[in-house]
Amino acid sequence: MPKAATPKSDKPAAKKTAGGSKRGASPYNQFMKTELVKVKADNPDIAHKDAFRLAASHWKHAPENPNKVPK
C-alpha cells in the first residue's frame, strides 16, 4: 500500500550561499586547514592520515581553541 503524500511546509527552503554552506567554518576547521599545510611542509613524506592526526593533536593546546587545556 503506498504511503500518503506529506504536506509541504509553508516556509521556503533555506538558501545556501555560493560556498555551499549556510555558516562559516568552525574555529577547529579553520585551524586544521592551516595546520595541516604546516605539518605537511615540515614532514613532506608523511602520509595524509598521519599528518591529519598530528595536526589534530596540536589543536589541544592551540590558542585558537576555545576549550584550550592548560599545559
Image (tube, rainbow, N blue to C red):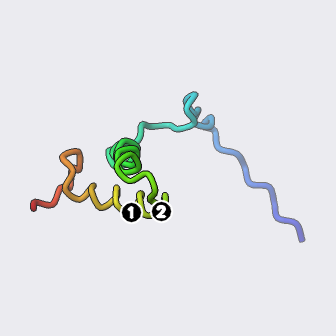
Q: Are marks 2 and 1 in contact (CB under 8 Å)?
A: yes
Q: Which residue is mark 2?
A: 49
**Crowd band around label 1 with a 10 angstrom C-alpha radius: few (<14), some (14–19), many (20+):** few
Dot 1 falls on a residue whose secondary structure is helix
Q: As rendered, which of 40 and 65 lies closer to the eye?
A: 40
Q: Quadrant of residue 24?
A: top left
Disc 2 crowd rating (10 Å Cα; few below 14, some 14-19, many 20+) is few
- Residue furthest out toward the right: 1
Give the residue type that dot 2 points to: Lys
Label ID, residue 7? none
Residue at figure coordinates x 39%, y 63% from the top left: 53
Judged from this view, the residue extending furthest toward the top is 18
The disc at residue 53 is 1
| Direction from residue 63 to residue 22 in the image, left or right | right
Q: Residue at x 33, y 45 (%)?
A: 31
Residue extending farthest to the left is 71
Which quadrant of the rendered structure holds the C terminus? bottom left
Whole-percent x, y for residue 52 in the image: 42, 58
Residue 56, image x and y in percent? 34, 58
> Judging from the image, what secondary structure is the residue with disc 2 in?
helix
* Alpha carbon distance from label 2 to label 1: 6 Å
**So how many labels did they put on this image?**
2
Badge 1 amino acid = Arg
Give left or right: position of 4 versus 16.
right
* Frontmost residue, 66 versus 56: 56
Residue 29 horizontal/vertical position (percent):
39, 47
Question: At 90% from the left edge and 71% from the top edge, which residue is drawn?
Answer: 1
